[in-house]
Image (spheres, rainbow, N blue to C red):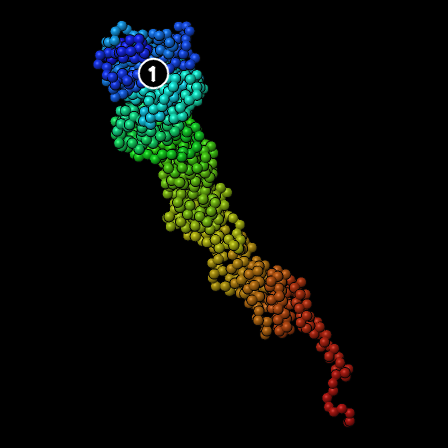
Amino acid sequence: MIPVALQQLYYTSCEEGLSGHAGFQFAAVSEGVSPALMRHVEALSAYDPPRSLAYPRTPEELAACPQNLGFAPGAQGDVVFRAVYVGRDFSERFGNYFVHALAGPDLRAELAGALPIELWGAPMWRATPDAGSRLAPLAGVERGPLDRRGVAGFVARHGHGAGLAGLLTAAARAQSSGRSVLLVERGAEEAAHWIAAACYLLPREVAESLSFATFQRRPSPGRLHICATLDETVREAGTVVADMALYDFVAGRFADRDGHPLARLLVRIGMERAEEAWRTAATFAVTRPAAGDWDAWHPLVAAATPAEVRFEPEELAALAGWLRASAAALGAARTEAIGRRLLDHAELADAHLWAVAEAARTAGATAVADAATVRVLGRELRAVVALGLGPRPAYRLPAVGGGVRGPLAEQCAAAMDRAAPGVRLAVALWAEHYGVPVDPAVLRRCGTALGERLDAVPADLAEKAVARLAPVHAGLAAHLVAAAGRRRPEVMTALAGRAGKLLELRGLEEYPLLRELNLVRRARERRDETLDCLRRILPLRPDPSLDQALLDEVRPGGDWSLAETIAIVDALQRKTMRAPDRVVVRLAADALRRPVSSDSLEDHFKLTYRLSRTEWWTQLPAPVRGDGERLLDLNNRLNGPLDAESVREIMGREPGYTAAARVLFQLTGAPGLVVRATEARYVVRILQAGRGGAYEALIRHLDGRGGGRPDDRLLAQVAGLLIARRGTPDALRGRRDRVLGAAVKRWPMPELERLGAVLDGIDPESRKALAGLMSRHGRPARGERLGARLLHLVGRLLGSGPRKGPAGGA
C-alpha cells in the first residue's frame, strides 16, 4: 500500500445527497473539495452502459458491464476515477452507475510511482456509498493486478499485437496534437491492458500525464488522449468519430499500423526494460528534447537499447550517423557510454561500426574507438582469409595505436598459421595497409612458401606482396638461393619466369648468387653480351677468378667462338679478369682446334698470334702449338721479300701446311706468290692451292701483257694458267680466255713453240689445248709451217714460181 492523502468523491443517483434533491449527484466528498472539481469529475465520469447490458436481469449480467477507469489532469487537480454500472437506482429505474474518484493537486506525486492505469482492479475502489456525506482522505493506494510482465504477456498472446507500435505513436501524438485515440476492444479489461502497454513504453512523465478512459459508450474527441469503447458500441451509428485515430484490436483496423520508428524500437525493447532505456537515453542528451520530439529521442533511446534487442537496418544507419555527427557535442564520456552499448549489438554492420569508431576518435573516447576499429577490421580480415584474395581495404586509418595494433596483430598471426601461401600473403598485405605489425620472420616464411608454390598464388597478389613487403621478397630470394645449391638449372629457369620478375620488383643487390645465375642465363641467351656478363659475374663470387665450371655453365656445349676467346684472353692480359692458366690453355686450345674457314681465319690467326706472345703459348698441347707455329711461319714468309727462291721454299713446304695455313695461303699467300713464280709447276700448284684468289691475281697480272717477247716468268705464268685452266672459277673464265688468246695471237711463233715445250714437260694434254687456241686464232702449228715452206720451194724448182725480166723476147 502506498501512503497518500487523496480527496475522495462518490457520485451516483441517490435519494439524498449533497445537492439537496433526489437524482444523480455527489453522495459524499472529502473536506475541501471545490465545486469546480466536482463539476470536473461529474463531466469526466458520466457513464452510459452498452445497449446489450443496460437492463441486466442477473448479478452476472450486471457484473459483465464494463468498468470505466479514467484519468485526467486538470486545473482543479488531477483526477483518477472508476465508474461502474449498478443497474437500478433508489427508484428501481435502470441506468444508475457509481463513481469513486480520487483527486489531488499533484496526484502523480501522491501515487508515488504508481501509474494511474495501474489502479485498474485495485481493491480500494467502492461501488456503494458509505453512510454520511463526508469522506476521509484516502490514507493509502493499492495497485491493481496490472504490471509490466503481465501486460507484455497479454500483448504477446493477442492476435493483433502488431498494432501496439501504432497505438503508442498515436498516444504520444495525442498529447501534442490533441487528436484523441479511439481504442476498440471486446471488454474494458482488455482496453486497460492496451492503455497500460502504452504507458509502460512511454517515458514516465508522459505516461503519468496520459489521460484515458477504459470505457465510453459515446466517446468524444479532444477531451481525453485515449478513449476506449467496445466492439458492439463502435458499430452503433455515430460512434466512430472521424477525427479520432482508430485502433480497433477486435477487427484489426489501425489508423497507422507501423507507427514511428521509435515506437517500433520501444516495442522490441519491451515493457520491462523501456523505463530504464528512457532513463539512460536522457543521460545521453546534451540538451533534453521535448517529450513529443520523437525524432530527436529516437537515436538517444536506440543508444540506450539493450544488446539483445534487434535493430532495424535503417535504425542502425541513423544511429551511427547521429553518433558521428554529435560526437563532438556529446563529449568523450557520453560518446564512450553510447559506443560501449552499441558495441554490444552483434548485428552492427561494418559501416555502423566504423561510424562508431570515427565518432569515438572525434570525441576522444580512445578505448571505444580502438574496440570498434578492431571489430570492423577483424571482420574485414576474416573476409580476406575466407576469400583468399588480395585485400581491397575499405577504410583509411589515422595512426594506429597499440589498442588496435596488438589485437589485430594477434588475429593476423592466427589467420596466417597453417594457411595456404595465397592467404598468408593476402593477410600480410592487409596488415601492411593498416600498419599492423607482422613478425618479419613470419613474412620471410611467406616468401619461402611462395617460392615453393608459386603457381598456386594469383599473379597480382604475389606481385603486390613482393613489391611492398621486403621480408617476403627476402624469403622468396632465400628459397631460390637454397635451391640453387642443388638445382642450378631449375633456378635459372625460375629466374627467367615469374619468380625472376617478382624478384626484380625489389632488385637482387643482396643476393649475388641469384645475380650470377641471371647473368649466366643472359650470357646464354645473348652471345654478344657474354664477356660483359662474365666481367659482372666474377666480382659477385668469393673467388673472383674465371673457372672451368663457369665457362661450361655459360656455354654448356663448350662452343666458345674465336672472337669470344680472343676477348677473354685480352681481358686476362689487361688484368680486368683473372683465371688459372689451365683454364685459359684449355679454352684457347679448344678454340684453335676448330675447323678454319675463310671467315674465321682472321680470328684464328689473331688468337694464335696473341697466344704466341704470352706464357700460355708453351703450355698449349704440342699439336696445337705446332700448327700455330707453322701458321706464323707461313705468315712471316708471305710478308717477307718474295723472289723466285722464296717462292720455291714456300711451295716446298706447302704439302705440310695445316688447315689454317692452307686458308692463309689461299687468302693472302697465293695471290702474291702466283705473280712472282718463275716456274710453271709452281704456278700450277699455287693456283690449285690458292683457288679463286690466286686465279684472280694472276689473270689481272697477265691482262695486257700478251704482246712482245715474253720473259721466262711470263711464259711460266701463262703455261701454269693453261695447265690449271680447268680450275678457273666460272666468273673468271672469260677473262682467262682473253688473256690466253692475246698471248697466242701476239707472241712470236718461237715463243709459242717454247711455251709448247714447257707444256710438254709438265702436262702434254695442255699442249693440245694450246694447239686449239692457235688454230682458233690463225696461228699454225710447227708442222704446218714446215709443209708450207716445202711447197713454196718445190713450186719454184718446177717453174711455177714467178720469173724475173721482161716477158717474151730474147
Residue 230 against residue 175 in the figure, above or below: above
Camera-side residue: 332 or 378? 332
- Name the residue at the bottom extreme: 810
Q: Is residue 505 left or right of residue 593?
A: left
User: Residue 102 occupies which quadrant of the picture?
Assistant: top left
Camera-side residue: 255 or 672? 255
User: Residue 367 occupies which quadrant of the picture?
Assistant: top left
Camera-side residue: 676 or 444? 444
Query: How many labels were placed on the picture?
Result: 1
> Residue 146 at x, y = what percent?
34, 13
SS for tag 1? loop
> Residue 115 at x, y = what percent?
30, 16
> Residue 70 at x, y = what percent?
32, 16
User: Residue 713 occupies which quadrant of the picture?
Assistant: bottom right
Q: Amino acid at mark 1?
A: Ala
Quadrant (top left, top right, bottom left, bottom right) of the C terminus? bottom right
- Label 1 Cα crowd, 10 Å radius (few <14 / some 14-19 / many 20+): some
Residue 130 against residue 778 in the figure, above or below: above
Which residue in the structure is indicated by mark 1? 46
Residue at 42% x, 22% y: name it: 238
Camera-side residue: 506 or 208? 208
Q: Can see residue 106?
A: no
- Name the residue at the front extreme: 21
Quadrant (top left, top right, bottom left, bottom right) of the N terminus? top left
Q: Can see residue 694?
A: yes
Q: Is residue 600 left or right of residue 223?
A: right
Residue at 59% x, 71% y: name it: 706
Residue 616 against residue 85 in the figure, above or below: below
Residue at 49% x, 60% y: name it: 638
> Residue 481 at x, y = what percent?
41, 35
Residue at 52% x, 54% y: name it: 599
